[in-house]
Amino acid sequence: MKPTKLISALMLGVVCAIFASCKPNTEVTVKEAGTLLSQLKDFKSLEDITQLTVKGPLNGNDVSTLRSLKNLSFLDLSQSTLVGDGTYEVVFGKKTENVRAKENEITKKMFAGCAGLKSISLPSNIVAIGMSAFDSCVGLKSIYIPSQVRLIADRAFHGCDSLTGIAVAPDNEIYSSMDSVVYSKDKKRLVIYPTGKKGEYAVPEGVEAIGGGSFRGCKGLTGITFPATLNRIEFFAFQNCTALTSLNVPDAVVSLDFFCFEGCLKLSDIVIGKGVKKIGEGSFWGCQGIKSLSLSEGLTTIGKGAFPMSIFLISLNIPASVKEIGEDAFKNSKTLSEIVCAGSVPPSIAASTFDQVDKTTCKLTVPKGSKGAYMRSTGWNAFKNITEI
């Protein structure tokens, strides 16, 4: 061997010694769907496969094989196709589920729980990414959405704690991407924010809706700024964004969907814009850190369980426009010492709306001449310290 070739070989050996993951890529061409396992058995051990390229048709049985490769980090399926045949088993927690593969789809939970998977290239002709398809793929860092994808289902990338980048093929007719965030093609709706991104984020001007579950589980999100164009925040949009501390909802927003900020444990200061008519059920469920809550005139409904567990909230101002406050809306807000109701006509409430609030010491302030109405109103009549201004 010539000296230069010997040195190159030695250098390669050193690099491979330093990087334990520097194992040869395993490449398999499947001619008949369902035969991936038999072809992989030509290798000494399935546990040795860390990098894999698969070409040809794959069915549900082949998906089971892929899921069984416990040390698989890099998977290239760009030259494969998915056919609608066979099933694969998903064990998630205590539940076991058998899922049937569908043609040209990354079906439900296909790679859910594949914690070691760091990179995957999807088949170029897939049309859908199913519910929870990559749920809890905690090692997955980035992903490319092919041009023919027409549907990305709810929770598709839930629990992908390392995911910081999602790119969409420029010619995709349904979705687009900008700064590693997925939007609708016209960029009026934010669809998916990568779970692993950290810090603050300013939603671009022109966005009109924050899609359902789009920021769900983004534990590193510390701040969010909305554009003046925003008019809707959908269900579960910011569920379990545990590092989010403040919120200012623009005036153009009409409603907050159910459980949209559930589990935002550190959310302390909330300003609800003038355009919001309804705060949906459970919108701020479990947001126990709330200290300041500003509700604007024009709000008509505060839904069931909207602000329970607000254990630091001391005072509450309810606008005159509010007509209904649902069950458990302020349940367990034990520090609440003053409620100011601006309406002469008491809003409709349930017996549990202010459950665990000390109704003997909590001061209820109402408009002059309306004390009698509150004393006769169901729920409000439990308050013993009612004064007029």
Image: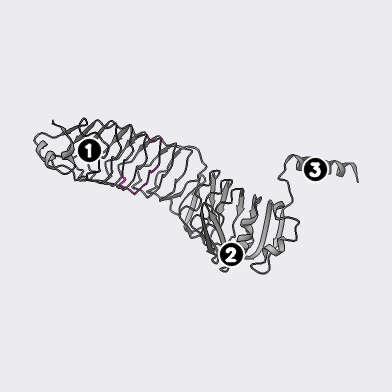
Residues at marks 3 and 2, CA–CA distance in whole angstroms: 38 Å
Front-lying residue, 147 or 120 = 120
Indicate which label's residue lies in the foreground, 2 or 1. Answer: 2
Query: Is residue 180 located in the magenta-colored stretch of the structure?
Result: no
Seen at 51% across and 41% down, the residue is 197
Q: Earlier in the sequence, mark 3 or mark 2?
A: 3
- Callout 3 touching callout 2 (CB < 8 Å): no
Q: Which residues are magenta?
A: 252-267
* Relative image position of residue 101 (x, y in whole percent): 55, 65
Seen at 26% across and 35% down, the residue is 357
Q: Residue furthest front?
A: 94
Seen at 11% across and 40% down, the residue is 373
Query: Is residue 255 located in the magenta-colored stretch of the structure?
Result: yes
Residues at marks 1 and 3, CA–CA distance in whole angstroms: 71 Å
At label 2, counting other C-alpha atoms closer than 10 Å, the crowd grade (few under 14, some 14-19, many 20 or more) is many
* Relative image position of residue 341 (x, y in whole percent): 19, 36
- Which of the 4 image quadrants contains residue 263? top left
- Callout 1 touching callout 3 (CB < 8 Å): no
Seen at 11% across and 36% down, the residue is 371
- Which of the 4 image quadrants contains residue 5? top right
**Residue on which the image places disc 3:** 13
* Helix, strand or loop at mark 1: strand
* Relative image position of residue 336 (x, y in whole percent): 27, 32
**Residue on which the image places disc 1:** 318
**Residue on which the image places disc 2:** 60
Front-lying residue, 163 or 114 = 114
* Helix, strand or loop at mark 3: helix
What kind of residue is marked 2?
Gly
Q: Residue 250: which disc?
A: none
What kind of residue is marked 3?
Gly
